[in-house]
């Protein structure tokens, strides 16, 4: 998408290209070096080549006193500035004197890249998998999402699919906004469930961020799958990724996120620092997240949905579906039948209904199939 492209309330900015950056002391030694770690440069820094005193240089330095050994990840997209990031301990070692700050970069019209993959199923109804590709050198909060999503895409490409899968690799926030601005009506019409795949590489407990309303098919399936592992559910108000765009009121897609360590410093102290490196993510962590998402996909592929055909409660007796003698046993059976009818709205799967009624899923399915044969319910996608 070219720079200057309008997407809802946003505009695609100029493209940033960086070749080299450093701060050198009076002897010419590089004491902060982009070649050593690309987090040393404030993301989106404009070009500079200046010699300045330490006191002036300090205004362009970023560190984190809370994590004195870590290089923080900082960016400045919509305000032109330049700067360098370094550990707090390294910053304290800087001595008074003159320093040369060099950032060899360009900020000029270019493009914002993204990729989408559509895997058609027998149904046009869609499941969304969205991950982002924008954080440099972040292992859990970047690399893990595309790795697990790519593995899921490979799995889906090799299986018979009931649903169509829309798989996105996009820059966070702006990428989802741009994509939605081009595909919103189609996605609102087709999407039955969606997942933002991020922070899925470490071995800590799982985290679940529900959709804005918290009661979509994606919410219910995610909670059911997560029961077998240790996890913490957060309120939607503690969001911080593309679910903010997918669940915004005029978009309102049924999108949730299942993570390992959630993207905040309370559960993920390495978040947005150089400590989020390849030592943090493990094959076991990645595999665990892949398996959780695979189980969610399996549950979606096998979900059975029914919708009522007759307004109001149908008369079951004249169809031979209602007990003609009231007993304790028949009361329980009728209660289950009424429950199946009550939730036959095309949005609650049979597994959801069984969970609400606290009965066996096979019992609910048998009742639904009997009602469908009698013309009272209709199976839907």
Image (tube, grey):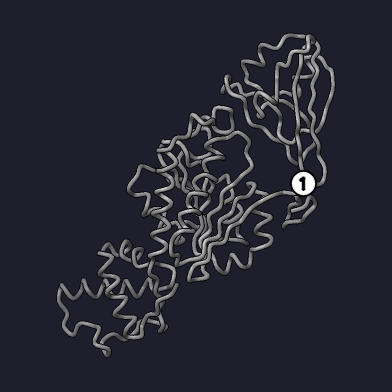
Total label count?
Answer: 1
288 left or right of 332 in image: right
| Structural crowding at the residue carrying mark 1, measured as other residues with C-alpha within 10 Å and reported as few (<14), some (14–19) or many (≥20) | many
Q: Which residue is mark 1?
A: 13
Q: Residue 22, image x and y in percent?
A: 75, 22
Q: Residue 52, image x and y in percent?
A: 83, 17
Q: Identify the element where label 1 is drawn.
A: loop
Give residue 72's quadrant in the image.
top right
* Residue furthest right in the image: 50
At horizontal 52% and vertical 48% (from top left) the residue drawn is 197
261 left or right of 171 in image: left
Residue 21 vs 235, above or below: the answer is above
Q: Tell me the quarter of the image containing the C terminus.
A: bottom left
* Residue furthest bottom in the image: 318
The residue closer to the viewer here, 150 or 261, is 150
Q: Residue 267, image x and y in percent?
A: 47, 34
Residue 316 vs 194, above or below: the answer is below
379 left or right of 117 in image: left
Give residue 39's quadrant in the image.
top right
């Amino acid at each position: 998408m070219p720079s200057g492209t309008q997407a809802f309330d946003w505009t695609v900015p100029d493209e940033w290209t960086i070749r080299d950056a450093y701060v050198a002391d009076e002897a010419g030694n590089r004491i902060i070096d982009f070649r050593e770690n690309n987090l040393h440069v404030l993301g989106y820094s404009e070009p500079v080549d200046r010699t300045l005193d330490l006191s002036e240089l300090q205004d362009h330095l970023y560190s984190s006193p809370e994590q004195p050994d870590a290089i923080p990840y900082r960016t400045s997209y919509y305000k032109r500035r330049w700067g360098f990031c370094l550990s707090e301990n390294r910053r304290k070692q800087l001595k008074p004197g003159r320093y040369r700050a060099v950032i060899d970069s360009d900020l000029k019209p270019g493009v914002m890249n993204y990729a989408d993959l559509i895997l058609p199923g027998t149904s046009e109804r869609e499941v969304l998998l969205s991950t982002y590709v924008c954080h440099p050198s972040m292992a859990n909060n970047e690399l893990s999402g595309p790795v697990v999503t790519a593995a899921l895409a490979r799995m889906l490409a090799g299986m018979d699919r009931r649903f169509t899968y829309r798989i996105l690799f996009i820059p966070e926030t702006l990428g989802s906004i741009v994509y939605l601005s081009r595909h919103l009506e189609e996605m609102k019409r087709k999407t039955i469930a969606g997942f933002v795949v991020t922070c899925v590489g470490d071995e800590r407990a799982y985290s679940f961020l529900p959709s804005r309303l918290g009661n979509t098919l994606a919410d219910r399936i995610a909670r059911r799958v997560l029961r077998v592992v240790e996890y913490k559910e957060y309120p939607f108000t503690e969001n911080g990724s593309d679910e903010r765009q997918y669940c915004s009121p005029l978009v309102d897609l049924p999108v949730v996120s299942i993570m390992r360590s959630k993207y905040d410093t309370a559960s993920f102290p390495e978040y947005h620092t150089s400590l989020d490196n390849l030592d943090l993510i493990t094959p076991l962590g990645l595999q665990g997240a892949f398996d959780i998402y695979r189980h969610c996909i399996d549950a979606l592929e096998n979900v059975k949905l029914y919708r009522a055909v007759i307004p109001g409660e149908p008369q079951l007796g004249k169809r031979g579906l209602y007990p003609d003698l009231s007993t304790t046993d028949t009361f329980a059976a009728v209660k289950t039948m009424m429950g199946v009818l009550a939730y036959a709205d095309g949005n609650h799967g049979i597994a959801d209904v069984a969970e609400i009624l606290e009965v066996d899923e096979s019992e609910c399915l048998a009742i639904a199939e009997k009602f469908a044969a009698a013309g009272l319910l209709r199976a839907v996608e």
